[in-house]
Image: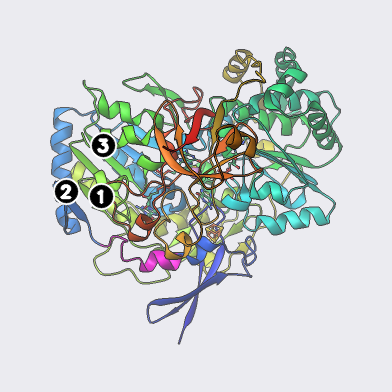
Amino acid sequence: MPQVHHRTCHICEANCGVLVEVEAGKVLSIKGDPANPLSRGHICPKGTALQDLQEDPDRLRKPLKRVGSQWHEISFEQAFAEIGEKTRAILARDPASSAIYVGNPNAHSYGNALNIGFLEKALRTKNKFSASTVDQMPHQVANLRLWGHASMFPIPDADRTQTLVILGGNPMASNGSLWTVPDFRARMKDLRARGGELVVIDPRRTETAKIADRHLFIRPATDVFFLVALLKAVMARKPHHPVQDFVTGLAEVGALIGRFDAAACAAACAIPLGEIESLADRFASGPAVLYGRMGTATQTHGTLNAWLVSLINIASGQLDREGGWVFGKPAVDTLSALPPGSIGKHASRVSGHRSVLGEFPAAAMAEEIETPGDGQVKALFVVAGNPVLSTPNGTRLAKALESLELMVSIDIYRNATSAHAHYILPPTGPLERDHYGLFLLPMAARTIAVYSPPTLPQSDGSLHDWEILRGLASAISGEPVQAPTPREALDGLLRTGPYALTLEQVESHPSGIDLGPPPVGHLPETLRNPDKTIDVAVDEFMAALSAVEVPEINPLDTSLRLIGRRHLRTNNSWLANSRRLIKGPDRCTVMMHPTDAEQRGIADGAAVTVRSSAGEIKLSAEVTEDMMPGTVSIPHGWGHGRPGVAMANALGKPGVSVNDLTLNEIDPLSGNAALSGIAVEVEAAA
Ligand SMILES: Nc1nc2c(c(=O)[nH]1)N[C@H]1C(S)=C(S)[C@@H](COP(=O)(O)OP(=O)(O)OC[C@H]3O[C@@H](n4cnc5c(=O)[nH]c(N)nc54)[C@H](O)[C@@H]3O)O[C@H]1N2
Ligand SMILES: Nc1nc2c(c(=O)[nH]1)N[C@H]1C(S)=C(S)[C@@H](COP(=O)(O)OP(=O)(O)OC[C@H]3O[C@@H](n4cnc5c(=O)[nH]c(N)nc54)[C@H](O)[C@@H]3O)O[C@H]1N2
Ligand code: SF4
Ligand SMILES: [Mo]
């Protein structure tokens, strides 16, 4: 008899409830769970691909050891013993010579999140890198300075707003980010049914722009000028709700932005001033909220953008108000469980980058491996990451990895990064472990508590990520790790959380407990700033903004600016081996506007070379009016055809890596990579 198991899909941030039908250990079907109060039955193609991941013959089941170019299966015991011994020998020579890179799936696994610290501690390393600095670090720096905690993420109260403005995010493809908002399409339908408006500002007419009431093109990496102009317009109006007394410093910010000419800012970002004024009217007149994401973060002004987005919401009276800029009240008080975050504790060895939340920029990882001297990285541990495809200048990083004395990947695939490792340690498959959305439920459009037990039994001899992390930590340190299991820890966190739940109670509601919309009107007590006020005139941000000059736009400039994109059927680099998802047309194309294509003699579908100062790639052109003229878009996460990759389906459609074009430039305030808006040239391939 088939049995139906409830589960949360943890591939992306949406955390949809799914129903997995299983018979005799085999998955028969995966469907959306209509009873889940947050996702209400929504599922995307990636959710059903969980089955492919489970069954994929290329997914690693046993540890691999590389000798030259030969791979051998070994036991976990042997792997831990050898890695422990090698690491100790390397650290005995130079205690500062190890590094760790923590990839995105760690944010989707509470077991990893609660146990990665053991490995970091055993390595005693300051060289910490993660996917955060090719993603959301600017938001976290802004959070720390405004609210007192790097993980205190504001979200748009989309279910109750009348105007939602999305800047540099494409939830119709990504399903939301730093905002757990499954079934975005239905939520937007509801918004419009109540007479509300969705506005999208993006250099591409995206899938989200296509369901919006208004779409405005913005010139890549000029968001700071749009935001300054909008803030000026907002501050010139009387907000519908007054700004609360616990906010200070708005007048100083107003004085600082006084020097910017709104018309010049509008010209720089290519958004008509009239549109900016009309947005400001909507913000002054009723519930409205501005949300900025990925496209605004991956710029040299990423942190200023994140700060300005919050400032606009604050100055228009939308902070902590229904339909405005709000904070969730999750069942686990993650803010108490995590350190608030600090900046500048250490400096990186080669470029002197300051640490942000204890990390150095991922963009600086290659130089730390390449540059000789004390503290040169010799041993690298990659935990659920694929930095060769996901961090800037991947070709340079891949070359640097070859020089390591020891590289260990904890990963489910032998891919573009782990193929360089000496050891690959694979964890259990995605249906064989339990799940709780520790970091994502706090950002949910509607608060829920939901726990998924493992759907399928763990296969013999396999280990969970958290067990591998502990195994490595104790092999390196020589001491056993003594700590509660993730499940025990979760129970404790729920009990001490704001609703004093137990794991047993949560488990007895397999579709989740509905805890309602994000609460409003309690912000001062939630703030982590010691005086419970918000000083928006953050010195460091004020200084950085005062140094920003509005560029003159040369109308004769025909150079092209590169931006990224995501597709509903991919997830960064790692779902490319799913037979369900890889089907269909080539998605790794360079999109460009007909005018730009014509100027270069490029026809739709033609093979082209795209070149930056870092390198070049060859792929097909997709000529489309959806692109802003002067801008080209290439998705990331492709380029599987590198040596050593063992993913048969992905190799059938490998694509090329946009990160062979991106540069090691960063946002100095956060260390985040500046991936958006870099100059490229496109020409018909020879
Ligand atoms: N140019 C450009 N570059 C980008 C982006 C962009 O928009 N443009 N986006 C950036 C963003 S937002 C991110 S988050 C990063 C992602 O950067 P990374 O996290 O480095 O890359 P992923 O492709 O997510 O790789 C995840 C890896 O984890 C493995 N994996 C998957 N599930 C598990 C698991 O449960 N356990 C273990 N141990 N391994 C697992 C996969 O096989 C894969 O190797 O990429 C960034 N890079
Ligand atoms: N299907 C799918 N879903 C995913 C992922 C995936 O790979 N595939 N990845 C997951 C991860 S790790 C993350 S972080 C989230 C990200 O989720 P989102 O933040 O929604 O990311 P994107 O879809 O990349 O949308 C970024 C948008 O910014 C635009 N953009 C680029 N440059 C600029 C600019 O300079 N200014 C402005 N204003 N816009 C710009 C791009 O055109 C794009 O539409 O998605 C998550 N969900
Ligand atoms: S939207 Fe995200 S969480 Fe929901 S089914 Fe798709 S991949 Fe899974
Ligand atoms: Mo991400």
User: Which residues are drawn in magenta?
Assistant: 50-61
* Identity, as a three-letter code, of the amino acid under mark 2: Ser
Disc 1 under 8 Å from ligand 1? The reply is: no
Apparent side of residue 611 relative to residue 561 in the rendered image (left or right):
left
Label number found at residue 221:
none
Label 2 sits on residue: 69
Mark in the foreground, 2 or 3? 2
Where is residue 170? Give x, y as percent. 62, 46
For mark 3, does the 10 Å Cα neighbourhood hold few (<14), some (14 to 19), or many (20 or more) residues?
A: many
Q: Secondary structure at mark 3?
A: helix
Apparent side of residue 512 relative to residue 282 in the rendered image (left or right):
left
Q: Earlier in the sequence, mark 1 or mark 2?
A: 2
Apparent side of residue 465 relative to residue 156 in the rendered image (left or right):
left
Where is residue 519? Give x, y as percent. 70, 48
Label number found at residue 401:
3
Give the CA distance from mark 1 to mark 3.
13 Å
Above-or-below relation of 549 to 520? above
For residue 105, say whether it is visible.
Answer: yes
Count of numbered tags: 3
Magenta highlight on residue 331: no
The furthest residue to the bottom: 1
Please report contact status of discs 2 and 3: CB closer than 8 Å, yes or no: no
Label 1 sits on residue: 644
Magenta highlight on residue 51: yes
Please report contact status of discs 1 and 2: CB closer than 8 Å, yes or no: yes
